[in-house]
Image (cartoon, rainbow, N blue to C red):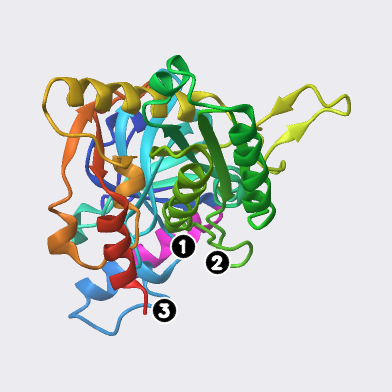
């Protein structure tokens, strides 16, 4: 296939880095080639009517870009939604799932990567996750001075039980001085599944959690947010063993490592006077995916660098306070 000079077929290793590409199910490969050949023939024939279907209307494209080449695949950025929000998801495309890479230079087309349909369906329908860590400010001082009582901690636990019952789609894992949150979401496909990504829910939930900690412990909190893949795909938010003494979050530990790296970077920046302490710290991919239409104010939200784990690109975290971000989100809501 693609023997015509109209097409440039090449090895996955030659795909451009940091440029737009599109992924497409291999089942459209022959139809896509035929549509482009017909389009070119009609174009050469004194600009006759376009072909049916147009090559731009064949199949369904998955916009992406290559971050870096790996030994057995490509680390890519995938963009499930660029209309309502700028949603970027970093995943690995194994070389074994790539069928053909081709480009139509004559018409300024983007490199098109045909991939196996099973892989494409899996990444659209599998569960991905959002994570947050809420931590108490100055808990160490309170403990050292004996100002934390058991009844306060029990009251905190009971209030979190009530809150968790009202949000069955979120896992709550609590300690005396911190809380981990996890919620799943899917991208969905044109003919199955649904796009359920809603990171704003975790941001707004922070306000309720903040009030609970104030009411029970009399202390403030801050939160760190990140996103990640979920290698358990179809499983529930968490697993609890029958014996009750084993809990699994059904996730890799990488997103939590990212959260800890952001937390460490923020603490260092505060100590060094780079920025003051804030209530919210968000990984760049998480922040940029928020549905905020006030782009002028959005661009003013400050950021600072950190080094993500197992990533080929440098990372950033955004920092702000709840009231400021909530106002931006409220301005977007109709």
Q: In the rendered image, which quarter is residue 61 located in?
A: bottom left
Mark 2 is surrounded, within 10 Å at the Cα level, by few (under 14), some (14 to 19) or many (20 or more) other residues, namely few
Q: Is residue 284 left or right of residue 133?
A: left
Q: Earlier in the sequence, mark 1 or mark 3?
A: 3
Residue topped by disc 1 = 60
**Residue range (magenta):** 27-38
**Which sits in the foreground, 226 or 153?**
153
Q: Is residue 30 visible?
A: yes
Q: Residue furthest top?
A: 144
Q: Residue furthest right?
A: 242
Q: Residues within 10 Å of mark 1 (few under 14, many from 20)?
A: some
Decide: marks 1, 2 in contact (CB < 8 A)? yes
Q: Which residue carries the number 3 mark? A: 52
Find out whether the residues at labels 1 and 3 contact each other: C-beta distance under 8 Å: no
Q: Position of residue 157 (x, y in %)?
A: 64, 38
Q: Front-most of 32 and 287?
A: 287
Q: Quadrant of residue 280?
A: top left
- Is 43 rendered above or below residue 172? below
Taking the spot 50% from the left edge, 31% from the top edge, the residue there is: 178
Disc tally is 3
Q: Callout 3: 10 Å neighbours few (<14), some, many (20+)?
A: few
Q: Nearer the viewer, mark 3 or mark 2?
A: 2
Which residue is disc 2 drawn over? 190
Residue 55 image point, x, y percent:
37, 67
């Amino acid at each position: 296939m693609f023997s015509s000079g109209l097409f440039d077929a090449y090895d996955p290793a030659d795909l451009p880095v940091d440029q737009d590409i599109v992924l497409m199910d291999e089942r459209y490969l022959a139809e896509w080639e035929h549509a482009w050949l017909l389009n070119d023939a009609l174009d050469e024939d004194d600009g006759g009517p376009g072909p049916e279907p147009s090559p731009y209307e064949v199949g369904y494209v998955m916009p992406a870009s290559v971050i870096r080449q790996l030994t057995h695949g490509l680390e890519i950025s995938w963009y499930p939604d660029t209309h309502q929000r700028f949603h970027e998801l970093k995943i690995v495309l194994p070389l074994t799932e790539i069928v053909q890479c081709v480009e139509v230079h004559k018409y300024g087309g983007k490199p098109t990567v045909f991939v196996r349909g099973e892989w494409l369906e899996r990444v659209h329908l599998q569960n991905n996750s959002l994570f947050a860590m809420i931590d108490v400010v100055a808990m160490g001082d309170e403990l050292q001075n004996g100002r934390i009582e058991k009844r306060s901690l029990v009251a905190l636990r009971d209030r979190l039980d009530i809150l968790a019952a009202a949000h069955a789609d979120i896992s709550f894992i609590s300690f005396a001085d911190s809380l981990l949150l996890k919620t799943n979401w899917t991208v969905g496909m044109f003919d199955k599944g649904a796009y359920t990504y809603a990171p704003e829910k975790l941001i707004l939930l922070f306000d309720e959690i903040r009030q609970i900690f104030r009411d029970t412990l009399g202390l403030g909190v801050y939160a760190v947010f990140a996103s990640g893949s979920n290698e358990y795909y179809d499983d529930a938010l968490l697993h609890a063993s029958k014996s009750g003494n084993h809990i699994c979050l059904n996730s890799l530990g990488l997103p939590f490592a990212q959260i800890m790296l952001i937390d460490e970077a923020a603490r260092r920046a505060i100590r060094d006077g780079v920025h003051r302490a804030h209530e919210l710290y968000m990984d760049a991919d998480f922040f940029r995916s928020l549905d905020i239409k006030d782009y002028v104010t959005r661009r003013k939200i400050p950021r600072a660098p950190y080094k993500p784990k197992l990533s080929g690109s440098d990372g950033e975290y955004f920092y702000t306070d709840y009231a400021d971000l909530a106002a931006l989100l409220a301005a977007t809501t109709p």
